[in-house]
Amino acid sequence: MVKPKISGYMSKEINLVWFRNDLRVGDNPALFYAAEQGTVIGIYLEAVEQRKLHDDAACKIGFINDSVKELRKELNQLNIPLHSFKVEDYQQSAKKIEQLVKEYQANGVFFNNEYPLNEKERDEALEKILLKQGISVNRYDGDLIIPPGSVSTGKGEPYKVFTPYKKAWIEHHKMQGASPLPRPNKQSYKVDKQSDYDFSHEYRQDLWPAGERAAQERLKEFLPKAGYYKERRDIPSVKGTSMLSPYLAAGSISARQCIEALLDWHDGDEDAFYKDTWLSEIIWREFYRQIIIDNPEISKHKVFKSDAKEVWNGQQDLFEKWCQGKTGFPLIDAAMRQLLQTGWMHNRLRMNVAMFLNKLCLIDWRQGEDFFMRHLIDGDFASNNGGWQWCSSTGADGAPYFRIMSPITQSQRFDPEGKFIRKLVPELASLSDKDIHFPSSEQREELGYPQPIIDYKEARKRALELLS
Ligand SMILES: Cc1cc2nc3c(=O)[nH]c(=O)nc-3n(C[C@H](O)[C@H](O)[C@H](O)COP(=O)(O)OP(=O)(O)OC[C@H]3O[C@@H](n4cnc5c(N)ncnc54)[C@H](O)[C@@H]3O)c2cc1C
């Protein structure tokens, strides 16, 4: 344990800032207000066993740990130290904070809220303990653009449907605004030695350079393409989306910073800004966060719609083939291989593979949700659960039960020349634009590509019968 030189902190009060999914210096309310009120000591805790319980992917953990390293560099430039420690689980996290408060003789603890149930309960328990000890607890909503509960229906209830939520969200944003906070001022003492731990780097660093600067770079690269987003966002062979999701999930960039930059890109034209499709996707992110806040049962693997039919009795070997990208449906296999190779999957494909697994193979969507968490670099409980429940028609404003994407038609429509498939399923590269979406039995034999694991028409018919 590195002891701080208390004398170096002058007479100002000492505030601990506990960083979690907010690994940035800009637009970080906990950091900003802690620095306004006193001298800041940054803390990061890696809860090793908790990560296992939450099925966090190795690539996500590696990316986050490198993001912490980058955060330390940023903080040190402001003369703010960042001490990081490994702990077992969330109970230990709370104990560690309590211990650090004592060691540093801190007056207050500052953090930005996380919304899934385990995190919420951890924070509430810690808050109680610290308040009893006379330590101030200062909580903020840095992960959301508008604070939880800012909008509700005419009856004062939380929204369950996206479109009216979005309308109310926009009205709220128009009235209240939500400008990002600046970086805090430089502190007046030099940073001493900082506690750190060893960690893995098991992620594609070539694709996902970690940290706040890299996130800002990515946003800058994306904005000139924002005008084409609506047309290109569904084409997986094209870089038509921002690929900011791992950075938003780790908090290397805030959603507020993203949309402020989008408004600037629209030259402050609010009409164009509020109609922007990319903004709409960011509002989906807010919607799913609000859903888990209002419905804590979701964090316990419950379906959102209590009357949803759960008819998942598919064969486990179908799940295995799906996981490996060997279903015999080229678009599905290309998508799953993209996930396995990069830790990320294009949104159109996430929808396709989820519906394929759940509705066509009749595998419980929760198995798919877990598999995604175990492999996604952007694994985010609210968005992942929201996406899976949307696809399986069990969720808030989910797809209607009869909406089942055809993996062949979707392939013809969104990857017409098979460019994406050719890259991810190279054994099919020699096929024509027509054949690549669903090769014949002979072509499969010849190229060493699996036969389809389901009969699409039959599977679709069966799903409709079971779900109607
Ligand atoms: C089954 C399924 C599982 C998903 N799991 C996750 C997950 O674990 N983590 C995650 O961040 N997103 C998840 N999504 C949402 C979406 O697929 C990704 O956010 C998106 O593909 C990320 O790429 P991008 O950064 O280029 O997005 P862009 O299209 O550039 O969108 C910008 C940002 O908006 C947010 N966003 C976009 N679409 C959605 C959406 N449908 N729901 C919620 N937020 C959205 C993301 O933060 C994204 O980075 C899931 C979707 C589905 C259908």
Image (cartoon, helix red, strand yellow):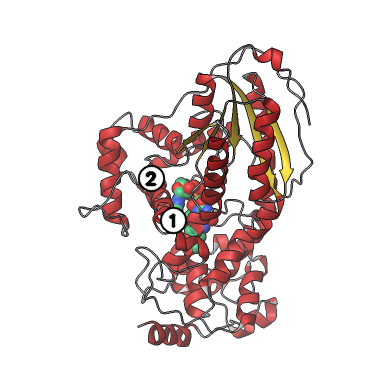
Q: Residue 130: horizontal and vertical position, in percent?
A: 57, 37
The image quadrant that residue 273 belongs to is top left
Nearer the observer, 366 or 158: 158
Amino acid at the residue labelled 1 = Ile
In the image, is 283 to the left or to the right of 239? left
Where does residue 457 sit, x and y in percent of width and height? 45, 85
Q: Looking at mark 1, is its residue's CB closer than 8 Å to ligand 1?
A: no
Residue 268 pos. (x, y %): 31, 29
**Neighbourhood count class around disc 1 (C-alpha, 10 Å): few under 14, some 14–19, many 20 upward:** many
Task: State the residue at coordinates (70%, 13%).
Answer: 7
Question: In this figure, which residue is indicated by the disc labeled 1?
Answer: 292
Task: Answer above or below: position of 123 versus 179.
Answer: below
Q: Secondary structure at mark 1?
A: helix
Quadrant the N terminus occupies? top right
Above or below: residue 170 compared with residue 110: below
Name the one closer to the observer, 283 or 458: 283
| Neighbours of disc 2 within 10 Å: few (<14), some (14-19), many (20+) | some
Residue at label 2?
148
Q: What residue occupies the far left of the structure in this picture?
A: 154
Give the side of residue 464 with respect to residue 301, left or right: left
Is 120 placed above or below 447 here?
above
